[in-house]
Image (cartoon, coloured by chain):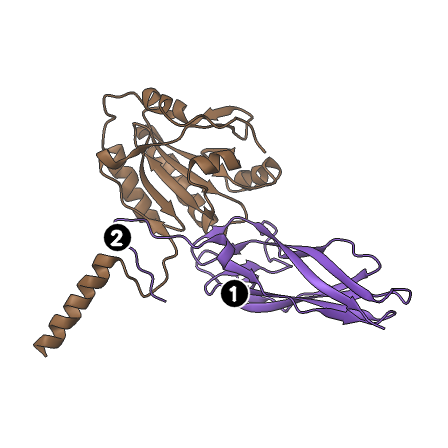
């Protein structure tokens, strides 16, 4: 009996160590990375729904939830009301949500949707160049949490629970920006994507 | 299926190309003055679905098969399978989807004046796939199907 338990425990430990999972991996979810492992978030400049250019690096000093989404993506739509809630509750603490829509039809489709859903955060229309800067973004939703220094603190591909996001946001809001200015960090990044919609 | 990767590495994402496969086509034949049926068989990776040709939400991208003109054949009709209405964790209402393996049939009229010989039908299959947690970007695959007009 003891041997059986020992064998089961050893097998479980092996599976955990190798990351084996009887279910096929379908999403990527990571907790907030330690400071030294964070990479600078690629900068971009895209038009928002009011026609104003949003340069990511202009949000210096804020914790940013950068969400790639589309109106045709069911799992993305579950998250949008959460982001509206986060924007409302944490805005005053230096937090901002930025939605990057990957809809091919651009504002014709996106504007009515965000109006209908009363989206209270800035939304821009993404393009292939920006997607490439962030690893291709082949799956949606893909969400990055950026710390106050403009570095990617966590990445989520696929639907994540509201609680998981909130835990990370609160954690990142609790930390002050390092000595380096965000503008300085962004300046050292990959070339900016061309502004403008599709 | 067992998916393994060290915990310190990100989990591999499914490659888009592997989610939907167009199975090798079989040659369609027709006599002049009859109707031929072109069959495109599609197989989806388990756990994934595509929106049907008639999605239940106007924002969703429908499955669409289009054919380039192939004289002297004339497109007559297209038949998609009966979609299934599936409920997913991310949707309040069931969605009209296809999953597993299914066929799309397109009927072409071969005019009585059509000369015997080989033709090739070229088409494009547009789809957008999701699983219960994420969606993949819409994609278009080329479809090619040999056709023979026989006496």
Residue occupied by mark 2: B7
Q: Is residue A186 left or right of residue A16?
A: right
Q: Can residue B54 be seen from the camera position used here?
A: yes
Q: Secondary structure at mark 2?
A: loop
- Residue found at the very far front of the displayed protein: B117
Percent from the top left, x then y, of residue B94? 53, 62
Q: Which chain is brown?
A: A
- Is residue A180 shown left or right of residue A5? right
State which mark lies toward you, 1 or 2. Answer: 2
Q: Which class describes the residues within 10 Å of circle 2: few (<14), some (14-19), or many (20+)?
A: few
What residue is at 35 percent from the left and 64 percent from the top? A23
> Is the same chain shared between marks 1 and 2?
yes
> Would residue B92 appear left or right of A10 to someone viewing this image?
right
In percent of width and height, residue A92 lies at: 33, 28
- The purple-coloured chain is labelled B
> Residue B77's spot in the image, x, y percent?
76, 64
Q: How far is mark 1 from mark 2, CA to CA? A: 33 Å
Q: Secondary structure at mark 1?
A: strand
* Residue at horizontal 26 percent and vertical 57 percent from the top: A19
Q: Quadrant of residue A1?
A: bottom left
Q: Quadrant of the C terminus of chain A?
A: top right
């Amino acid at each position: 009996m003891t041997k059986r338990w020992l064998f089961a425990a050893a097998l479980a430990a092996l599976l955990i160590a190798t990351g084996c999972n009887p279910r096929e991996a379908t999403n990527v979810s990571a907790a907030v990375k330690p400071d030294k492992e964070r990479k600078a978030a690629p900068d971009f400049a895209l038009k928002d729904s009011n026609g104003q250019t949003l340069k990511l690096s202009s949000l210096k000093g804020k914790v940013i939830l950068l969400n790639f989404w589309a109106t045709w993506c069911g799992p993305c739509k579950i998250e949008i009301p959460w982001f509206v809630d986060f924007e409302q509750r944490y805005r005053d603490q230096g937090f901002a949500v930025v939605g990057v829509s990957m809809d091919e039809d651009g504002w014709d489709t996106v504007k009515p949707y965000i109006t209908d859903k009363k989206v209270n955060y800035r939304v821009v229309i993404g393009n292939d160049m920006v997607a490439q800067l962030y690893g291709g973004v082949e799956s949606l939703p893909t969400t990055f949490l950026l710390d106050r220094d403009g570095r990617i603190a966590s990445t989520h591909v696929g639907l994540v629970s509201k609680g998981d996001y909130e835990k990370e946001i609160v954690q990142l809001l609790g930390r002050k920006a390092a000595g380096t200015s965000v503008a300085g960090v962004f300046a050292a990044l990959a070339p900016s994507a061309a502004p403008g919609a599709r | 299926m067992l998916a393994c990767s060290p915990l310190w590495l990100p989990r591999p994402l499914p490659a888009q190309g592997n989610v939907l496969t167009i199975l090798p086509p079989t040659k369609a034949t027709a006599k002049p003055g009859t109707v031929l049926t072109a069959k495109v068989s599609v197989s989806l990776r388990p756990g994934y679905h595509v929106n049907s040709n008639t999605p239940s939400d106007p924002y969703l991208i429908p499955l669409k098969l289009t054919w380039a003109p192939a004289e002297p054949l004339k497109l007559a009709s297209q038949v998609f399978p009966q979609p299934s209405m599936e409920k997913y964790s991310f949707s309040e209402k069931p969605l009209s989807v296809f999953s597993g393996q299914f066929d799309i049939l397109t009927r072409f009229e071969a005019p009585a004046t059509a000369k015997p010989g080989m033709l090739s039908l070229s088409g494009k299959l547009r789809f957008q796939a999701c699983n219960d947690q994420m969606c993949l970007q819409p994609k278009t695959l080329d479809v090619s199907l040999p056709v023979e007009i026989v006496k």
